[in-house]
Image: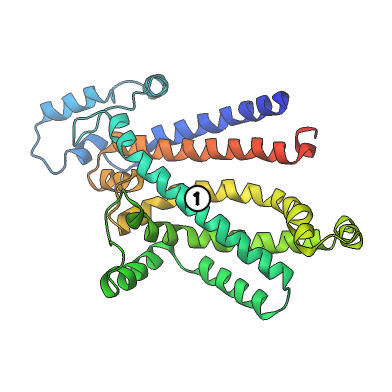
């Protein structure tokens, strides 16, 4: 197991390296002078522009700047926000818990709803339950999360006045964003769970368990479901990463403080150090989540770590 984890950690190193290269190169990929873009809304002199370039070390060679970026990042320094003149890490970690809370709530909702629909559809294959569950799954995949968020605001905030339309913190502010963000993931999990359950229910060990006189609930929960969840675990990890990045749209729609909304504001304000820091945290979060999923997958399925 230790050997497997070590191999996965080593495989993550080039991915992280590529992420840092891509994030750092943002300043060079945008057209024009990034300093002039950041200061475009202000009246500036050539001396102020030169001072800003010196502050951002843009006069140094590319690899010198990249090395400084990585070194400072390893020490928790992602630069200073141009707009607020505050450390980027401070601004990010002030709102990051709200984003993680939303992503975890959406994942919990999507996992429970998706697994329930998938199991029911598999146990009632080709019935109206199966057709209805897969129809809901298709609708969930087809609806953009931001559009669903607007519909939820229209119904539950403006018409019924049951839930707040904007803000963050307590449970009422979390319900609609979690539903809007998690419904698409629930649809994907439902379809995969159904497919996996159908394959497992046709296996010989399930037939043997039924022949021994075990109850249907025991066969489904203890034998079929545990084995059907093995391929679904990978989807949980991928969906969590997707949900984490999907908060960009949901936090904007619901006016919820978080890393996604912070990134959008940084883009609109042309605050490139804050944009770089936000994108880097999103990317590293995705990498870390997938690494944890690989480890959990190996724990659940011993065949993986012996391959």
Q: Up-down: is 280 above or below 174?
A: above
> Where residue 125 sits in the image (x, y, percent)?
73, 73
> Where residue 76 sits in the image (x, y, percent)?
37, 23
Q: Which residue is mark 1?
A: 242
Q: What residue do we see at 76% from left, 53% from top?
A: 222
Q: Quadrant of the C terminus?
A: top right
* Label 1 CA crowd tier, 10 Å (few <14, some 14–19, many 20+): some
Q: Nearer the viewer, residue 211 or 300?
A: 211
State how the image is colored.
rainbow
Q: Is residue 213 left or right of residue 258?
A: right
> Where residue 299 sits in the image (x, y, percent)?
71, 36
Residue 205 position by quadrant:
bottom right
Q: Is residue 267 left or right of residue 12?
A: left
Q: Quadrant of the N terminus?
A: top right
Q: Up-down: is 33 above or below 175?
A: above
> Where residue 106 sits in the image (x, y, percent)?
47, 54
Residue 289 position by quadrant:
top right
């Amino acid at each position: 197991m230790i050997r497997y984890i070590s191999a996965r950690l080593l495989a993550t190193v080039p991915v992280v390296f590529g992420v840092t290269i891509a994030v750092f190169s943002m300043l060079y990929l945008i057209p024009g002078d990034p300093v002039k873009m950041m200061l475009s809304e202000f009246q500036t002199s050539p001396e102020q522009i030169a001072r800003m370039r010196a502050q951002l070390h843009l006069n140094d060679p590319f690899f010198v700047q990249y090395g400084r970026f990585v070194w400072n990042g390893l020490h928790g320094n992602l630069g200073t926000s141009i707009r607020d003149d505050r450390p980027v890490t401070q601004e990010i970690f002030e709102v990051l818990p709200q984003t993680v809370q939303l992503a975890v709530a959406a994942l919990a909702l999507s996992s429970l709803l998706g697994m329930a629909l998938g199991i029911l559809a598999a146990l009632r294959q080709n019935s109206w339950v199966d057709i209805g569950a897969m129809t809901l799954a298709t609708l969930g995949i087809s609806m953009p999360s931001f559009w669903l968020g607007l519909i939820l605001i229209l119904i539950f905030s403006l018409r019924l006045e049951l839930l707040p339309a904007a803000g963050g913190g307590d449970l009422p502010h979390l319900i609609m964003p979690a539903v809007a963000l998690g419904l698409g993931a629930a649809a994907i999990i439902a379809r995969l769970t159904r497919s996996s359950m159908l394959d497992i229910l046709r296996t010989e060990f399930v037939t043997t368990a039924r022949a021994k006189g075990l109850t249907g609930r025991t066969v489904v929960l203890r034998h079929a479901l545990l084995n059907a969840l093995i391929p679904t675990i990978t989807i949980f990890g991928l969906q969590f990463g997707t949900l984490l990045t999907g908060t960009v749209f949901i936090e904007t729609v619901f006016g919820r403080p978080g890393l996604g909304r912070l990134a959008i504001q940084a883009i609109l304000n042309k605050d490139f150090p804050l944009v770089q820091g936000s994108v880097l945290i999103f990317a590293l979060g995705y990498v870390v989540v997938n690494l944890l999923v690989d480890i959990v997958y190996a724990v659940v399925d011993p065949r993986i770590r012996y391959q």
